[in-house]
Amino acid sequence: MTEPTQMSLAAAAQAIRARDLSAVELLDACLGNISQTEPVISAFASIGADAARAVAQQLDGGGIAGPLHGVPIALKDLFFTEGVPTEANCEALRGFVPDYDATVVHRLRQAGAVIVGKTNTHELAFGVSCPASRNPWDPERSTGGSSGGSAASLAARQVFGALGTDTGGSVRIPSNCCGTTAIKTTRGAVPRHGVHLISWTYDTIGPMARTAEDCRILLEVIAGHSPDDPFSSKAPLSGAADPGGLTLGVPSDSFFDGIDVDPHVTAVMDAAVDVLRTIVAGISPVQVPNSAEHAPAGVTIVFAESAALLEELRANRHGLIGEEVQGILEAGAAISGTEFAAAQAQRVAFEHACMEVFDDQGVDLIIAPVNPNQVLPHGAVELNGVPLIPATTQFTFPVNGAGLPAIALPGGFAPDGLPIGFQLIGRPFAERTLADVGEAFQQLTDHHTHAPPV
């Protein structure tokens, strides 16, 4: 048998169902790998080895609980876990211990998942880096963020799946930097009850894993309406469409106006199109709204909503919030109601323009880079003199504004050996289709199988 931690989530789950492995054996393999790699990459904010082993032992003593029976999973440290600190890498939340599980955490447990621990994030998920964690491909390079700890843990083969949140790219960017796979879900597709949020409009929860198939397995567990979340949609995920009947849209040059895209990123996307050409029915050029049409409105909305969501922390514990995040919250609090209303109107117009790409131009998927740049140095705060967030989210942030799903897939490697990926964007609630196309792509490529040297 393949060394347990090198298996996919799907293969590991099957090995347990077939009694080729026990849940305890699989957990011990992961904990052993964590002990070896964690000193280098620091993916975890906290590890609950004893609690995880108790769950694994209980699962070994009973019947199959669900599709994740005995599979070790990690959670970004935004997800409430009963009796376990959920601190979001923020001193203002130090010592916060929820007395209940987030809806998605409850669903994972019901499906048989073994929660190993909480992964590091940028403070309160406000950034596109994860300062506490290191990239397994090169510890001197960024993991991306804000779900950087989750992606690093997956790449280092510490766990088989993880959850992250995505406000403007925070599951896709780390996956791009660490060579893993992730799905940014449709607005409302996955309930957010029991999760530290920074935006009602933009925040989504997404599955992260090493393969598209594994992400789909996680997605099926966590998706679906919850009465505890007034923002969760009652619309179900659509049935997966046959990839052989789909049309892939390739954005025209105007989509990239004003964005300095690294040539290696462009080369990876072009190579991905060549592979996808053998999977889908056709390739079509499309006019996609330029991200510059969305960015100012999106920033206004996220800043204002974050100030409202975190008003108590901002007002009462501001001395324990980092300077960068405090600045964002203060800027958000200063936004007027008329400015916020105008921004929401602009966002809705942008969302409709994005939907017209699918409805009027006859495509089912749109391909785009994740980051315009290669993996940046660890600790970088700007790119070519531009602050990190606006410099690296031109292709991810607009997807959140439009409320669309997207899957980030490994697409190749730069000359320095660091991974480069791309994303496929779909219609609302088309996550299953995205996962199936991603799986078909990964059956024809091996980028996702490469393990980092850590």
Image (cartoon, rainbow, N blue to C red):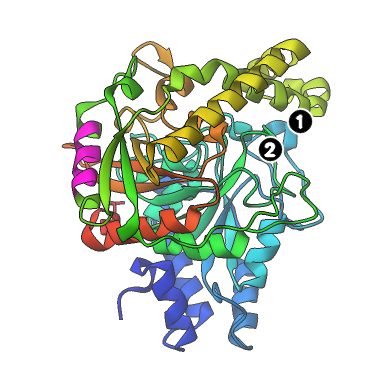
Q: Nearer the viewer, residue 59 or 212?
A: 212
Q: Is residue 392 above or below residue 110?
A: above
- Give amino acid for label 1: Leu
Residue 152 point in image, percent of width and height: 42, 48
Q: Position of residue 376 (x, y in %)?
A: 34, 29
Helix, strand or loop at mark 1: helix
Task: Give the mark nearest the N terminus, 2 or 1.
Answer: 2
Q: Position of residue 109 (x, y in %)?
A: 65, 68
> In the image, which disc is placed on residue 189?
none
Give the residue at x 64% y 25%. 302
Q: Which residue is mark 2?
A: 197
- The answer to which image quadrant residue 93 occupies is top right
**Residue at image x 63%, y 65%?**
108
The amino acid type of the residue labelled 2 equals Leu
The numbered disc on residue 309 is: 1
Marks 2/1: CA–CA distance: 7 Å
Lateral position of residue 381 relative to residue 46, left or right: left
The verdict on residue 374 being magenta is: no
